[in-house]
Image: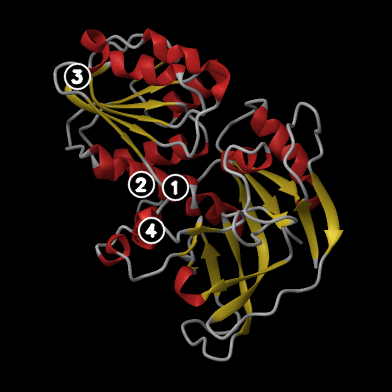
């Protein structure tokens, strides 16, 4: 099979082509696995974290990609959940132990044996991949393969983040950063909480204009002061400064949800600006998001089909994956980026 392969950690500034276009053996499904012929795979900022070592892969070489859509073309000997030809998706959660205290209470995202697609095993930047049948999801017919791909991570992790805000309809919500996840969450919030006003903080005017197009009542720069204090804010940026800026815009008792697998060290000194009285006092909360559960993926796909959510997508060929990553790094963002595997 054709695949884009990462062989070592590197910085994109030093090596703009970290992935190599190669031919690998076709994978073979084990007893409870299915083999998927991949048609689309989303490009996520987490891939930048993998390539640059902030959340390094556990093996090399590795095929990245964890927003995977394709068709089932082979079944393992004991796999019986899907049929040949079924269209399925694979998300960041590749497997969990199913037996620890976290898994037993539905928090498999916190499992000590949590394994991630495209980090702990080959993912979707390839023509084929295998996955346990219990960690694949039927894709609603309303979505094309390209549209479905970003729903599996940007959408699902956004949904989990929204759940963690404990938001009630009518409370004000802020979105700090407005990329793949933000533009999907905004559409979800308008459906679930029709009386909630949404405020967006983004670095570029292009992103701010896009947010207003989708229904944000206000959009300003990352460091701007919102017109009113916000009951909850979701941060999807890869740096520290927006944390400080978001906390100052929180209402008393408000909650800031940090939806990022890592924060870069380039601006870690921003935390020295943190002032207890200004940023944290009066029972403000700060909570991180870790991975997703299967429930998050299933429920979000259901909501997305019902609304329906239509992702804004930029499409690249498989062999153009390096360019997609460079564009993401350079913040050339409007919606989501997806590889089309032909």
Residue 247 in the image: state x and y as whole percent. 30, 18
Numbered disc in front, either 1 or 3? 3
Which one is in front, 275 or 320? 275
Q: Is residue 80 above or below residue 12?
A: below
**Labels 1 and 4 touching (C-beta < 8 A):** no
Q: Earlier in the sequence, mark 1 or mark 4?
A: 4
Q: Which residue is mark 4?
A: 111
Which numbered disc covers residue 155?
A: 1
**Labels 4 and 3 touching (C-beta < 8 A):** no
Q: Earlier in the sequence, mark 2 or mark 4?
A: 4
Mark 2 neighbour density, 10 Å: few (under 14) some (14–19) many (20 or more)? many
Q: Measure how far apart labels 2 and 1 are at the Cα level.
A: 6 Å
Q: Earlier in the sequence, mark 2 or mark 3?
A: 2
Image quadrant holding the C terminus, namely bottom right
Residue 245 in the image: state x and y as whole percent. 37, 14
Which numbered disc covers residue 24?
A: none
Q: Earlier in the sequence, mark 1 or mark 3?
A: 1
Q: Measure how far apart labels 2 and 4 are at the Cα level.
A: 19 Å
In the figure, is residue 13 to the left or right of 214? right
Please name the colour scheme applied to the rendered image: secondary structure
**Labels 2 and 1 touching (C-beta < 8 A):** yes
* Element under disc 2: helix
Q: Which residue is mark 3?
A: 251
Mark 1 neighbour density, 10 Å: few (under 14) some (14–19) many (20 or more)? many
Which one is in front, 289 or 236? 289
Q: Is residue 139 above or below residue 58?
A: below
Q: Measure how far apart labels 1 and 4 are at the Cα level.
A: 21 Å
* Element under disc 4: loop
Which numbered disc covers residue 159?
A: 2
């Amino acid at each position: 099979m054709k695949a884009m392969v990462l062989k070592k950690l590197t910085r994109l500034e030093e090596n703009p082509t970290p992935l190599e276009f190669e031919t690998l053996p076709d994978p073979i499904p084990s007893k409870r696995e299915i083999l998927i012929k991949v048609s689309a795979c989303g490009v996520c900022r987490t891939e930048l974290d993998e390539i640059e070592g902030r959340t390094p892969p556990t093996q090399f070489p590795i095929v990245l990609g964890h927003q995977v859509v394709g068709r089932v073309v082979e079944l393992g000997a004991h796999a019986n959940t899907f049929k040949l030809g079924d269209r399925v998706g694979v998300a960041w959660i590749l497997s969990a132990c199913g037996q620890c205290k976290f898994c037993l209470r539905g928090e498999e995202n916190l499992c000590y044996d949590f394994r991630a697609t495209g980090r702990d095993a080959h993912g979707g930047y390839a023509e084929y991949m295998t996955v346990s049948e219990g960690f694949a999801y039927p894709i609603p017919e309303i979505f094309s393969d390209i549209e479905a791909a970003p729903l599996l991570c940007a959408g699902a992790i956004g949904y989990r983040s929204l759940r963690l805000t404990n938001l009630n309809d009518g409370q004000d919500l802020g979105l700090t950063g407005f990329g793949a996840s933000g533009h999907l969450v905004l559409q979800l919030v308008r459906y679930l909480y029709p009386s909630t006003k949404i405020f967006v903080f983004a670095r570029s005017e292009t992103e701010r204009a896009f947010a207003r197009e989708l229904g944000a009542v206000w959009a300003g720069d990352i460091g701007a002061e919102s017109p009113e204090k916000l009951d909850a804010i979701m941060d999807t940026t890869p740096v520290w400064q927006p944390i400080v800026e978001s906390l100052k815009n929180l209402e008393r008792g408000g909650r800031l949800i940090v939806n990022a697998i890592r924060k870069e060290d380039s601006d870690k000194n921003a935390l020295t600006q943190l002032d207890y009285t200004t940023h944290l006092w009066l029972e403000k909360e700060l909570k991180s998001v870790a991975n997703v559960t299967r429930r998050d993926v299933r429920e979000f796909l259901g909501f997305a089909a019902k609304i329906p959510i239509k992702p804004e997508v930029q499409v690249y060929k498989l062999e153009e994956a390096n360019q997609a990553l460079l564009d993401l790094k350079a913040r050339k963002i409007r919606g989501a980026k997806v590889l089309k595997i032909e």
